[in-house]
């Protein structure tokens, strides 16, 4: 499925020849691919279109089908995952400092690089992850972005005993479980009236669930904004105590309205998350193997990708949508 231009539905394209991996690459037979809000930002034009048809999808689970020249440490048949960060230069100051997520030359799966809304995908072998065996393919897919980006945001929130999650979708429903397992109190904020997401939050251990308009019983130590709504920034700042942290976890967000300095004062911090590093991936996959996360997925056939994106846009499901290509 290709995104030809922003604002247009994805188009199905059939290619007779298989993509061939170059040096350092692997070809992967896709078993499942998660549907992320970043895919929606690409399709809707919130992200700059690369100027050519691109295959979205960066929560890719599959089996290695072919090795390119020079690949080591992987074998045909290995189950692997392909995340958002697909390539970095390795030589800039950020890469050398271990901050490859800030590499100015980075390329991203499903944006500059063709992604997993397909039967086959080629990926840089350095940027694939082995996946915990305890998760099925459909369960493992959301770990690769909802989990990874959520984990980076969670780490940036610090050691917060009371954690607020704004937007209880794919990422929040995973990170809530990590927080609960680490004996933190989770406060879940959903769209007004989204009782299904609120109930899911409570089922996963949240001590409170409601909308951002509802009064909280206590101040938070930190908040993570998964909803790409700039108007929530001042709301979250008002909800955290002095010295607290608000983390904006999305790659795109609507404009943040002006707000009084008083709600930032008191050494509150406002941070953004930019992508992920491979170290994030290794740490989160280890954690996911230890905690046994309950991953709530909604299955769609690959040809129904446009419907999955529309359902995500409208908030018609709780958890994570996952595409399944037809059998090879």
Image (cartoon, rainbow, N blue to C red):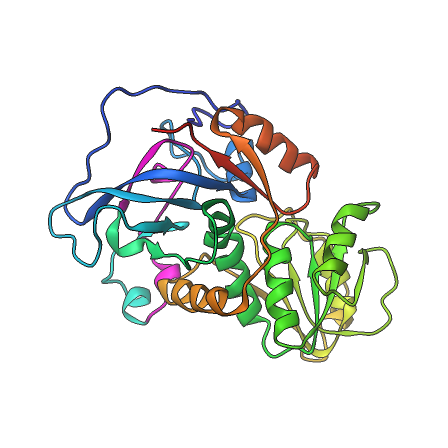
Name the spot of residue 161 as percent of width and height, x first.
69, 78
| Identity of the residue drawn at 54% across and 71% down | 155
**On the picture, is 128 further left or further right than 211?**
left
Q: Quadrant of the C terminus?
A: top left
Q: Nearer the viewer, residue 229 or 39?
A: 39
Work out whether residue 88 can be spotted.
Answer: no
Work out whether residue 138 can be spotted.
Answer: yes
Residue 247 on the magenta segment: no
Of helix, strand and loop, which mostly describes the magenta segment?
loop
Name the spot of residue 136 as percent of width and height, x first.
47, 49
Q: Nearer the viewer, residue 12 or 5?
A: 12
**On the picture, is 31 further left or further right than 322?**
left
| Residue 152 in the image: above or below residue 320 | below
Looking at the rendering, the stretch of residues picked out in magenta corresponds to 98-123
| Residue 193 in the image: above or below residue 183 | above
| Residue 82 in the image: above or below residue 3 | below
**On the picture, is 298 further left or further right than 105?**
right
Residue 115 on the magenta segment: yes
Place residue 279 in its image quadrant.
Answer: bottom left
Q: Quadrant of the N terminus?
A: top left
| Identity of the residue drawn at 21% across and 51% down | 75
| Identity of the residue drawn at 37% across and 27% down | 53
Q: Residue furthest left?
A: 69
Name the spot of residue 71 as percent of width and height, x first.
16, 52
């Amino acid at each position: 499925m290709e995104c030809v231009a922003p604002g247009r539905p994805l188009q199905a394209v059939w290619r007779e020849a298989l993509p061939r991996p170059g040096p350092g690459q692997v070809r992967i037979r896709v078993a499942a691919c998660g549907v992320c809000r970043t895919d929606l930002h690409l399709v809707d034009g919130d992200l700059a279109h690369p100027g050519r048809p691109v295959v979205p999808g960066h929560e890719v689970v599959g089996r290695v089908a072919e090795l390119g020249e020079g690949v080591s440490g992987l074998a045909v048949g290995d189950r692997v995952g392909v995340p958002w960060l697909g390539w970095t230069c390795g030589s800039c100051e950020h890469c050398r400092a271990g901050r490859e997520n800030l590499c100015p030359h980075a390329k991203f799966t499903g944006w500059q690089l063709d992604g997993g809304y397909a039967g086959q995908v080629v990926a840089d072998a350095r940027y694939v992850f082995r996946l915990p065996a305890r998760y099925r393919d459909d369960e493992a897919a959301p770990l690769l972005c909802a989990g990874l980006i959520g984990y980076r945001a969670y780490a940036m929130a610090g050691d917060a005993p009371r954690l607020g999650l704004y937007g209880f979708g794919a990422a929040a429903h995973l990170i809530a479980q990590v927080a609960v397992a680490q004996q933190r109190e989770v406060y879940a904020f959903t769209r007004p009236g989204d009782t299904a997401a609120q109930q899911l939050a409570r089922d996963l251990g949240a001590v409170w669930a409601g909308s951002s308009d509802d009064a909280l019983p206590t101040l938070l130590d930190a908040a993570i904004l998964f909803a790409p709504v700039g108007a929530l920034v001042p709301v979250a700042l008002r909800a955290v105590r002095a010295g607290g942290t608000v983390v904006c976890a999305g790659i795109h967000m609507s404009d943040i309205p002006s707000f009084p300095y008083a709600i930032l004062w008191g050494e509150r911090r406002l941070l953004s998350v930019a992508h992920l590093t491979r170290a994030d991936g290794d740490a989160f996959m280890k954690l996911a193997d230890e905690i046994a996360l309950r991953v709530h997925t909604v299955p769609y056939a690959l040809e129904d990708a446009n419907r999955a994106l529309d359902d995500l846009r409208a908030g018609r499901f709780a958890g994570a949508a996952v595409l399944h290509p037809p059998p090879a």
